[in-house]
Image: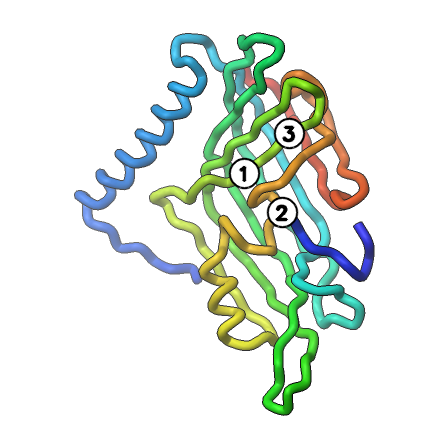
Amino acid sequence: MKKYKIILLLSIVPLFLSTSFLKKTNRVEDKWKSNISTNFRGTRSLSTYEVRLTYTGYGAFVGIEDCPIRTNGTVVLTGLLLGDENVPTDDDIFYAGILQLDIDMDICSVKHLPSGEARLCGITVVGSGPVKVELEIQSDERGGYIQMRDTTSRGFTKHVTGSCDQEQLDEERDNVPLNTKACLFSGSELPMLTQRTLRVGRYVGTGDLVGVVVEVLRKVK
């Protein structure tokens, strides 16, 4: 990842919910889990892994030379992923789970002054909450692909501040957590995962993925 030029491939809001609404949102999550079971062909024992994915760095819409942001922010995604590994050797393997996402990341952008001058500005995204995650590992050793599908009924705490235009801050707040530039795991290839299945170990990103670490902490079953 180049130091000064990068494009990432990529508040607390109390929710006073009625009992009927909670039941409805729980049914939505149950349906999501049911769909996972269908994709896993339902009847087989699923392998379960504890994982932690981290990114240390920053997000950017533009090059960051002289940009007023931190370059050592963090994103951490932790929890259990489960998947059916008893598939034909030429089939991709699909894992899914509800993982905890914690974001503390700066983004470099540009704001336009009344004079017409463009000036670099920064956005700070802080957020925390559970998200529904899917990880696909390709059968031909090309690596994995991770995507966050949705949040859950528990909600996602988020706080977005910075020196950019208020419109930019509001837009980025709306994008947190699924589409924000602050989170690399909102849809990203993980080429370091070249083994057929998840294996306990530490896998470090290179090139455009410098700062990314995938840890398979243990196989639960």
Location of the C terminus by quadrant is: top right
Residue with the mark numbered 1: 147
Amino acid at dot 1? Gln
Q: Which residue in the protein does label 3 denote? A: 144
SS under mark 1: strand
Q: Which mark is residue 17?
A: none
Q: Residue at x 57, y 22 (%)?
A: 49
Label 3 amino acid? Gly
Secondary structure beneath label 3: strand
Between the residue at mark 1 and the residue at mark 2, the CA separation in whole angstroms equals 10 Å
Q: What is the crowding at mark 2: few (fewer than 14 residues within 10 Å), some, or many (at least 20)?
A: many
159, above or below 45, in the image:
below
> Looking at the picture, how far across and down is residue 32, in whole percent?
36, 31
Mark 3 crowdedness (10 Å alpha carbons): few <14, some 14-19, many ≥20: many
Instruction: Give left or right: position of 51 versus 170.
Output: right
- Residue 123 position, x and y percent, is 60, 67
Instruction: Report if the CB atoms under discs 3 and 1 are less than 8 Å apart.
Output: no
Q: Which mark is residue 184?
A: 2
Separation (CA) of disc 3 from disc 1:
10 Å
Q: Position of residue 204 (x, y in %)?
A: 76, 35
* Mark 3 → mark 2, Cα distance in angstroms: 14 Å
Residue sitting at x 56%, y 45%: 186
The image's colouring method is rainbow
State which tag comes first along the sequence, 1 or 2: 1
Question: Disc count in the image?
Answer: 3
**Tag 2 or tag 3, which sits nearer the N-term?**
3
